Image (cartoon, rainbow, N blue to C red):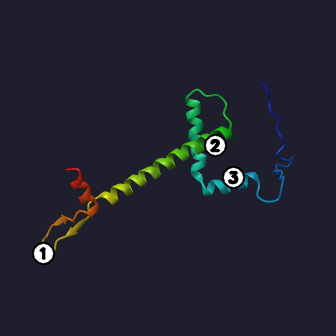
Amino acid sequence: MYEQPQLPLDTLDGEQVRLHDGPSLDERFEMFHAAHPWVFEALEELTAQWVAAGGGQIGIKALFEQLSLVTAAHLERRALQAEQQLHLALRAPTVRATPGVGRHVPAAQPAHERQRATAHT
């Protein structure tokens, strides 16, 4: 089996080697995680599901690809639900108060719906 060589990321005194100016990899992770804690939790969950299903090694790229698919599907479902709720809200009959009466009665049916209802009878 091929074994990837390990890069020396720590110096002898334990200080992390910086390959560029700016925050270290650990600092960048902490900043990202503080802003988006759900990402790491979702990656852990996907990994647990993979292992429970009998999967072997899996790379972070594959996990992120699966996460993007799951997230896109979830957002698509939420958008569809919102669209359906809006559609139902727009089609729901409006209710108005009748002056002098202590109950509500449905408002008049819009003209386009009256025409559609009479066309089917």
Image quarter for residue 2? Answer: top right
Q: Which residue is under mark 2?
A: 64
Please tell me whether mark 3 or mark 2 is closer to you in this view. Answer: 2
When asked about the image quadrant of residue 7, the answer is top right
Q: Are marks 1 and 3 in contact (CB under 8 Å)?
A: no
First in sequence: mark 3 vs mark 2: 3
Residue 96 spot, x, y in % from top left: 22, 68
Q: Which mark is residue 29?
A: 3
Which is more toward the observer, 25 or 104?
104
For the residues marked 1 and 3, what is the alpha-carbon distance in whole angstroms?
65 Å
Q: Quadrant of the N terminus?
A: top right
Residue at image point 12% right, 71% down: 101
* Label of residue 75 in the image: none
Instruction: Using the image, determine if residue 3 lies above or below residue 75.
Output: above
Disc 2: CA contacts within 10 A as few (<14), some (14-19) or many (>=20): some
Distance of label 3 from label 2 (alpha carbons) = 15 Å
Name the one closer to the observer, 76 or 5.
76
Give the residue type at disc 3: Phe
Up-down: is 28 above or below 51?
below
Q: Position of residue 4 (x, y in %)?
A: 80, 33
Residue underneath mark 1: 100
Residue at the extreme bottom: 100
